[in-house]
Amino acid sequence: LGAKTVVSKHGGAPCADVPVDEGDTVKFGACTIEVRSTPGHTNGCVTYVTGDKSMAFTGDALLIRGSGRTDFQQGNSRKLYHSVREKIFTLPDETKLYPGHDYKGRTVTTVGEEKKFNARLGLDKSEDDFVEIMKNLKLAQPKKIQESVPENLRCGLPAPVTGEPLEKAWAPLSRTPEGLAEVQAAWVKDHGEEVRLIDVRGPDEYTGELGHIPGAENVPLETLEAAAKDWDREMPVVTICRSGKRSLSAADTLEKMNFVRVASMAGGMIRWDDQGFPAESVSAPDAN
């Protein structure tokens, strides 16, 4: 029917027909929809607000009496808290909110109701309260999430028979706004033996409180480029650090060295620990 897909520029789906960002508008007929960036469940979450502010479509950021989870797909509880408080709760109390889905058959709420009754994000909850609530949810990973994410990033289009990017063949990756590849901790737990795990923290962190993933090699970030010169560039590599920032730098370094299958583990060892996955704390091997 000629419909076009409209997706956040930060959603990691270059196949979208219309990429949008904070403050953009989408027009159809006499209607205008304002785009508000509301990341926290994923980097690409947006809320669409009608021109008269009578309605807003919140996707998975704000649900009825709840919120999207923050433990996978670039989830970040603090980021989601600010998205809801600053981009959704600033709308008039009477604004009707339509979430992406609901588990009890409900379809609509209002800003005023959620401010008062939302058990996670109501006005009586502080940022630290929300972070603690989300940390203790301990939700199971959704079925088929590893298959669904790459399909979503391809806009549901069939994979090319030939010429498909190598990244699609070895892991379900997402991309940061800077274009760097990430893979989720749950996937690493299930497939860690199939890839080379490179922990780029210092030796003290590697053997410290968070420990390290069994089988991960300790190669501090400042020594990575020299250490990787003789590595197999075809071997899939997952870089790991405490929170996912240094490992993104490491992945960027390896990509620039022409490693063809490389990704950072999103959320780092903090995410790994939050999900209760096993870790070791033993003497770090020499990086060479």
Image (cartoon, helix red, strand yellow):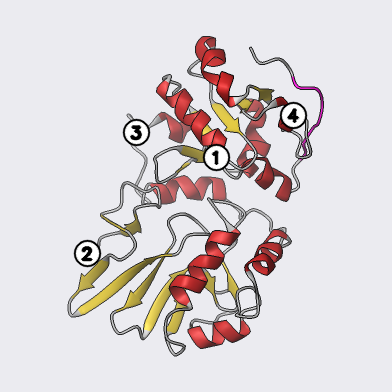
Q: Amino acid at mark 3?
A: Val
Say which of marks 1 and 3 sits in front. 1
Can the viewer see residue 170 in this picture?
no
Label 4 residue SS: helix
Q: How many marks?
A: 4
Q: Amino acid at mark 2?
A: Leu
Mark 2 or mark 1: which comes first in sequence? 2
The numbered mark at residue 204 is: 4
Label 1 residue SS: helix
Magenta residues, as a range? 278-284
Local packing at callout 4 (Cα closer than 10 Å; few below 14, some 14-19, many 20+) is: few
Mark 1 or mark 3: which comes first in sequence? 3
Q: CA distance from mark 1 to mark 3?
A: 34 Å
Mark 1 — residue?
A: 245
Most foreground residue, 19 or 203: 203
- Percent position of residue 256, x then y: 41, 23
Can the viewer see residue 69 in this picture?
yes
Q: Residue at x 49, y 56 (%)?
A: 42
Mark 3 — residue?
A: 161
Mark 2 or mark 4: which comes first in sequence? 2
Q: CA distance from mark 2 to mark 4?
A: 58 Å
